[in-house]
Amino acid sequence: MTVQRVSDLFALGRTQPTLEFIDVDTHGDTRLFIDPSALKNLDSVWGDECVDLLQNFFSAVLAAIRSGADAQARYLLASLSEPNDTHLGLSRGQAKGSGMGSGLAREMWDALRNSQAVTSGLLSDLEDTILFIDHIGHDRISDITTNIIRGPLVEFTQDVCGYYGIPMQSGVAVRVWDSRNGTWRQKFTDLPMTSTGRLLLVPKEIVRARGNFDPGSYYQHYILPYYQDVEYNAGRGMVRILRNGRRTVVPPTKKSVQHRYGRGKKVNLDATLQDPTLLERYRADAPRRDSILDHTEIAAKTSGVVPNWDALLQAVLDVPPGRPDADAYEVAIEKLLTALFYPALGFPKRQHRTHQGRKRIDITYTNLAERGFFAWLHRVQKVACGQIAVECKNYSKELGNPELDQLTGRFGVNRGFVGILCHRGFGDKALLIERCRDAVSDGRGYVLILDDDDLRELVEQRKKGETDFAFLLARFQQII
């Protein structure tokens, strides 16, 4: 069957690098998964809402099982329907999903009810189950997560559709988790439709090719070293002869430990019950293991394309300066920056309103940087920059203090104090940088100006594979 992506179906005129969602095949499944661990690494209100829903639901399931409320536990699990609407997962051909039908719900309930991981109180998060419970893999975790966070995904989809003009059908029935009342409820809402049914868009920042929590990696890097220490402390180490002829006792090899204790999720569980700090350390190391998929990795999984940097830049340069083309300039800038700064910056919001709607920011991004300039700003410089505000000025004249004041007026404790001012480059650039320095001196925040020449330089660096944004660091140092 011919692949028909969301961007093609709705004629968006965009490719995956400039989109904030996974541009899935609307006829089948894309082999990517929603990872609940990735949601915890999002420093955003939307991410926090998703995490709260996941923790609330899983706590309710565990509480029901531990208290013997079997009917309640089965009800909670059985309400997880097949998530065909995201088109993510392992299905072949038309998306079928692998969610929790009534039979699978019983199987899941049996596995949880009979597991010491549950009765001992060891489990606390959904992703923990993949380490210890049989028949639970990355696809199943993704399916469960999709169901639980369907409410926030609906809101995300509606925001995207509103911006791109994607038509939605009203009165579409969806089942969402009501954390306040601890129950599932049906609601009717607006969603886009395809030939296979309703469509739910998923932010590309929360998908992975493989989940962050993995029973194999847990076994290899935490369980086996634990048993090596157990064997060594029990006097069953290996004798090694040094070059000088001396003998020393060292821990046994992982291979010998594996031969003695075996492998599999039961081995993971047995060791963790003996030493729960193993799981604590594995959880604590989760952010270090996790990484947002970059353009190339997404393209490999979606059979999509990588950014055409020259075309994105040229689209900006082709916009004539002047107020009549201000909207075209803003759109072209947003396309370029969304691709250029990903995955350091994500979740673009256009025409974002603040102060109860009294003020508007052209574009805002959530700072997701794991390294490079934007991570350095947050972690080393301790600058509040959870969001990066962008203003676009397609003026055919020099910018002045009012334009800077407009951007710094959008800064705040909750939004951050870093912004980017894109303009065409007319006037005295050195003077404009001085004005940005004045804003820093006055405590009004940090404004990084980018004209057409600056964008050329950033694109050239990106084409060379550089993602640390050294150019922005140099510009930042100019104003402090």
Image (tube, grey):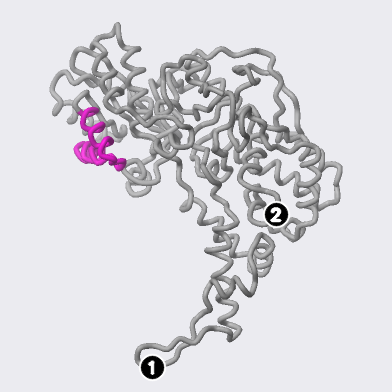
Frontmost residue, 472 versus 95? 95
- Return the mark for residue 295: none
Give neighbour class at mark 2: few <14, some 14-19, many 20+ (Cα, 10 Å): many
> Left of 102 or right of it: where is 149?
left
* Element class at badge 1: loop
Residue at left 22%, top 36%? Answer: 475
Q: Which image quadrant for residue 416?
A: top left
Q: Which image quadrant for residue 338?
A: top left
* Pointer 1 residue: 245
* Pointer 2 residue: 133
Q: Is residue 476 magenta?
A: yes
Location of residue 152 in the rendering, given as x and y in whole percent from the top left corner: 60, 29
Residue 385 seen by the camera: no
Q: Is residue 45 magenta?
A: no
Residue at left 53%, top 14%? Answer: 166
Residue at left 28%, top 8%? Answer: 323
Amino acid of disc 2: Ile
* Element class at badge 2: loop
> Left of 393 or right of it: where is 434?
left
Q: Is residue 183 above or below residue 395?
A: below
Label located before the other in sequence (2 or 1): 2
Frontmost residue, 322 versus 25? 25
Q: Is residue 168 above or below residue 28?
A: above
Residue 364 seen by the camera: yes
Give me the C-alpha separation between circle 2 and circle 1: 48 Å
